[in-house]
Amino acid sequence: MTITTAQKKYAEAMHEFINMVDDFEESTPDFAKEVLHDSDYVVITKNEKYAVALCSLSTDECEYDTNLYLDEKLVDYSTVDVNGVTYYINIVETNDIDDLEIATDEDEMKSGNQEIILKSELK
């Protein structure tokens, strides 16, 4: 069976995560090859799902736009428990500029409060 670039990069990110935490005894979650291939990042967060990154737009048409937008979309996630701490393994993709949604106050709060342990590209 051929391993794709996305699968290899996911395995590398999981190896890096395992080296960061003590007493890791669980197996890392498996995601479908297609999910990894179509996604852009694996993001590991502590205690809650990834709230996705926010961005602002700076173009000639909207130079006065002060809104924050959802730059990414959560595709899938799984959890692992290490010494009583829950870590979320999140698979995300970057939104196209035409698909950006305005972030809510709740999105902004969650994004500001999340604890990102590792974010790694899958492509």
Image (tube, rainbow, N blue to C red):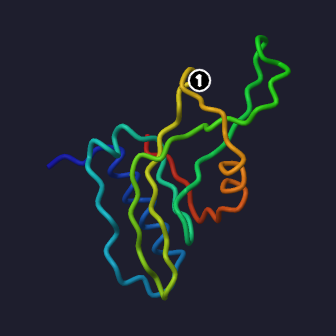
Residue 63 located left or right of residue 4? right
Farthest residue, direction front: 105
Quarter occupied by the C terminus: top left
CA neighbours of label 1 inside 10 A, class few (<14), some (14 to 19), many (20+): few
x, y percentage for residue 92? 47, 46
Quarter of the image where one finds residue 109: bottom right
Decide which of 74, 42 is in the foreground and name it: 74
Write the residue at 76% across / 32% down: 67
45 up-or-down from 27: above or below: above
x, y percentage for residue 63? 83, 19
38 up-or-down from 78: above or below: above
The residue that mark 1 highlights is 97
Is label 1 in a helix, a strand or a loop? helix
Quarter of the image where one finds residue 115: bottom right
Kind of residue indicated by mark 1: Ile
x, y percentage for residue 104? 68, 43
Write the residue at 26% across / 46% down: 33
Decide which of 59, 105 is in the foreground and name it: 105
Write the residue at 78% across / 17% down: 62
120 up-or-down from 5: above or below: below
x, y percentage for residue 32? 26, 50
